[in-house]
Image: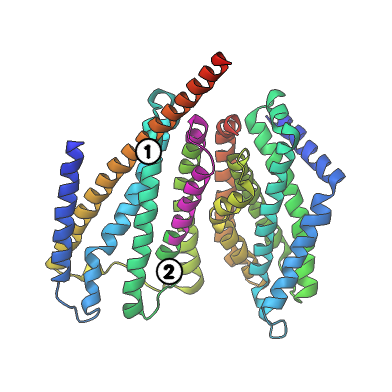
C-alpha cells in the first residue's frame, strides 16, 4: 500500500514536470506550438503497447499451470483496461496534432490504422470479460483471447503496412516528429515516457487491488448467502 | 486427428444439408448484401465494377460471421457440444472438422457471389487461377479464425453480438489481402497478387496452428 503511494507521488511529480517542460517548449518553424505534443503523444503510445504486453505476459503466466494465480488474471484485466485508455488517448492526441499539421483529423496511415484496430481488439477482449461472472473459466478463456490478440496486432500491422506501401505509396513516413527535434524536445519526451510509465504502474497496482477486493467481497457475499440458506433449512 | 476432423466436418455438413440454413438463409443474405451495395453506391458510373473486389470480400466476411455463428449454434442446441466432448474426439480434430465445414460452405457462397458480381456489377472475372488461389487461402484463414473465436464465445450468453466484435478486427488482414489479390487479377496484373497470396497463406497457416493448439483449452471452458 505504502509503496504504491510513493509510486503515485512520483507519477504525479513527473507528470507535472512533463506538462511544465512540454508547455515551455518553443514553437518550431514547421509545426508551430503543436510540436509540443511530442511530450505526451509518443509516451502515451509507448505505454499502450507496454500495457498490452503486460496483459499478454500475465495471461501466459495464468495459463501456465505452475504459475496459475488469480492475481495474474486480475493484472491482465487491469492492464488491458489501462491499455485501452492509453490507446484512446494516443489516438485523440494524434488526431489533435494531425489536424493542424496534416490538415486532417484522420488519415489511413499504417500506424494509425493498426492502432485503431488494436483499440477495437482490446475492447472486444474487455467485452468478452464483461458478459460472464468472474471465475477460473473466465480467467482461462480471457487468457487465451489475450494471447490471440497479441498475435493479431503484429499480423494486422504487417497487412496494413503493405496495404499502404504497396498500394498507394507511404503517405507519412513518421507520426513522431522526434527525429528532427533538438535536445529540449527529446528531454520532454523522455520525461513524458517516465511519467506515463509511472502513472500506468501506479494505476495498474490500484486497479489490481480493486479487482482482488471485489473478488473477495463477492466470495464473502456468496458464503454469507449460503450460510443464511443453510440456517433457513435447519430452522424449518 | 484427421479421421476425427472428417467425422465432425461430415456431421456439420450433413446438418446443413438437412436444415438448409446455409442455402436458404446465408446465401440469400450474401446476395442481398451485393444488392444493398448497389443501392448505396451509384450503379451507373462504374463505381460498383471498380469496387467489386472489396464489395465481394466484405460480403464474404459478413457471411462468414453468420456461418460461424451457425456452426456454434449447432453445438449449443440441446447441449450437443457436451456430447461431442464426451465422444472422446481429439480437440484438434474437432477444430479442423468444424473449420473445414465452415470453409466448404463459404466456398460455395463465394462461387455464388462471384457469379453475382459478374451479373449484377458487370465485372469480368480475369485470371481465374489467381482468383481461385486467393479465395481458397482466404477461406481457410476465415474459417480457422472464425472457428477459433467461435470456441471463445461458445458458452457465453451474448455470443451473437460478441463474435463480430472479436472476429472482424482479427480477419482484417484477410479482407485486405484477398481484396488486393482480386483487384490485381481483375485489373489484368496477376503478378501483383503474389505478396497478398503470401499474406493470406501466412494468415491461414497461423490460425490453423493456433486453433489446433488452443482449441482444447477453449473447449474445456465453454
Image quarter (top left, top right, bottom left or bottom right) of the N terminus of chain B: top right
- Residue A135 is one of the magenta-drawn residues: yes
For the stretch drawn in magenta, the main secondary structure is helix
Residue A206: where, in percent of width, then height? Answer: 29, 42
Does residue A90 appear left or right of residue B209 in this picture? left
Task: Left or right? Give the position of A188 relative to A171.
Answer: left
Q: Position of residue B172 (x, y in %)?
A: 55, 58
* Location of residue A152 with respect to B91 vertically, above or below: below
Question: On the image, numbered disc 1 is attached to which residue?
Answer: A211
Q: Earlier in the sequence, mark 2 or mark 1?
A: 2
Query: What crowding class fits label 2: few (fewer than 14 Cα within 10 Å), some (14-19), or many (20 or more)?
Result: some
Viewer-nearest residue: A134 or A46: A134
User: From where the camera sits, is residue B194 visible?
Assistant: no
**Is residue A129 inside the magenta stretch?**
yes
Mark 2 or 1, which is nearer the eye? 1
- Tell me the quadrant of the picture where the C terminus of chain B can be found: top right
Of residue A79 and residue A59, the one placed in the foreground of this image is A79
Q: Secondary structure at mark 1?
A: helix
Q: Output the chain of dot 2.
A: A
Q: Label 2: which residue?
A: A109
Check the image and name the residue furthest to the front. A236
Front residue of B170 and B81:
B81
For the magenta stretch, what is the residue range? A116-141
Q: Specify the label residue A121 is tagged with.
A: none
Give the structural element (helix, strand or loop) at label 2: loop
Disc 2 vs disc 1: Cβ atoms closer than 8 Å? no
Quadrant of the rendered structure where residue B64 is?
bottom right
Amino acid at each position: 500500500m505504502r509503496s504504491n503511494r510513493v509510486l503515485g507521488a512520483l507519477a504525479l511529480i513527473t507528470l507535472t514536470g512533463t506538462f511544465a517542460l512540454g508547455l515551455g517548449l518553443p514553437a518550431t518553424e514547421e509545426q508551430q506550438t503543436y510540436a509540443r505534443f511530442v511530450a505526451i503523444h509518443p509516451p502515451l503510445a509507448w505505454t499502450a503497447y507496454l500495457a498490452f504486453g503486460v496483459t499478454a505476459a500475465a495471461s501466459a503466466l495464468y495459463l501456465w499451470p505452475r504459475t496459475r494465480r488469480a492475481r495474474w488474471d486480475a493484472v491482465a484485466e487491469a492492464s488491458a483496461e489501462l491499455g485501452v485508455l492509453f490507446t484512446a488517448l494516443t489516438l485523440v492526441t494524434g488526431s489533435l496534432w494531425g489536424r493542424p499539421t496534416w490538415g486532417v483529423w484522420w488519415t489511413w496511415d499504417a500506424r494509425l490504422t493498426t492502432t485503431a484496430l488494436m483499440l477495437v481488439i482490446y475492447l472486444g477482449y474487455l467485452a468478452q470479460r464483461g458478459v460472464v461472472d468472474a471465475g477460473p473459466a473466465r480467467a482461462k478463456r480471457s487468457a487465451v483471447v489475450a494471447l490471440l490478440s497479441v498475435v493479431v496486432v503484429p499480423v494486422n500491422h504487417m497487412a496494413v503496412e503493405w496495404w499502404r506501401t504497396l498500394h498507394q505509396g507511404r503517405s507519412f513516413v513518421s507520426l513522431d516528429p522526434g527525429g528532427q527535434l533538438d535536445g529540449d524536445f527529446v528531454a520532454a519526451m523522455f520525461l513524458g515516457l517516465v511519467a506515463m510509465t509511472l502513472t500506468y504502474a501506479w494505476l495498474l497496482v490500484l486497479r489490481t487491488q480493486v479487482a482482488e477486493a471485489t473478488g473477495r467481497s463477492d466470495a464473502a457475499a456468496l458464503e454469507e448467502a449460503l450460510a443464511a440458506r443453510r440456517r433457513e433449512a435447519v430452522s424449518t | 486427428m484427421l479421421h476425427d476432423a472428417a467425422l465432425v466436418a461430415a456431421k456439420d455438413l450433413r446438418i446443413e444439408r438437412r436444415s438448409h440454413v446455409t442455402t436458404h438463409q446465408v446465401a440469400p443474405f450474401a446476395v442481398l448484401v451485393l444488392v444493398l451495395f448497389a443501392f448505396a453506391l451509384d450503379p451507373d458510373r462504374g463505381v460498383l465494377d471498380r469496387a467489386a473486389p472489396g464489395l465481394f470480400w466484405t460480403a464474404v466476411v459478413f457471411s462468414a460471421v453468420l456461418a460461424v455463428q451457425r456452426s456454434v449454434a449447432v453445438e449449443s442446441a440441446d447441449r450437443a457440444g457436451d456430447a461431442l466432448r464426451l465422444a472422446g474426439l481429439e480437440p484438434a480434430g474437432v477444430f479442423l472438422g468444424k473449420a473445414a465445414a465452415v470453409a466448404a460452405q463459404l466456398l460455395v457462397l463465394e462461387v455464388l457471389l462471384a457469379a453475382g458480381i459478374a451479373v449484377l456489377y458487370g465485372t469480368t472475372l480475369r485470371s481465374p487461377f489467381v482468383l481461385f488461389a486467393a479465395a481458397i487461402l482466404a477461406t481457410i484463414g476465415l474459417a480457422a479464425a472464425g472457428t477459433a473465436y467461435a470456441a471463445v464465445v461458445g458458452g457465453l450468453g451474448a455470443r451473437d453480438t460478441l463474435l463480430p466484435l472479436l472476429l472482424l478486427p482479427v480477419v482484417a488482414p484477410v479482407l485486405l489481402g484477398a481484396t488486393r489479390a482480386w483487384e490485381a487479377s481483375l485489373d489484368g496484373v496477376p503478378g501483383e497478387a503474389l505478396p497478398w497470396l503470401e499474406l493470406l497463406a501466412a494468415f491461414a497457416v497461423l490460425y490453423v496452428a493456433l486453433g489446433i493448439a488452443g482449441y482444447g483449452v477453449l473447449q474445456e471452458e465453454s
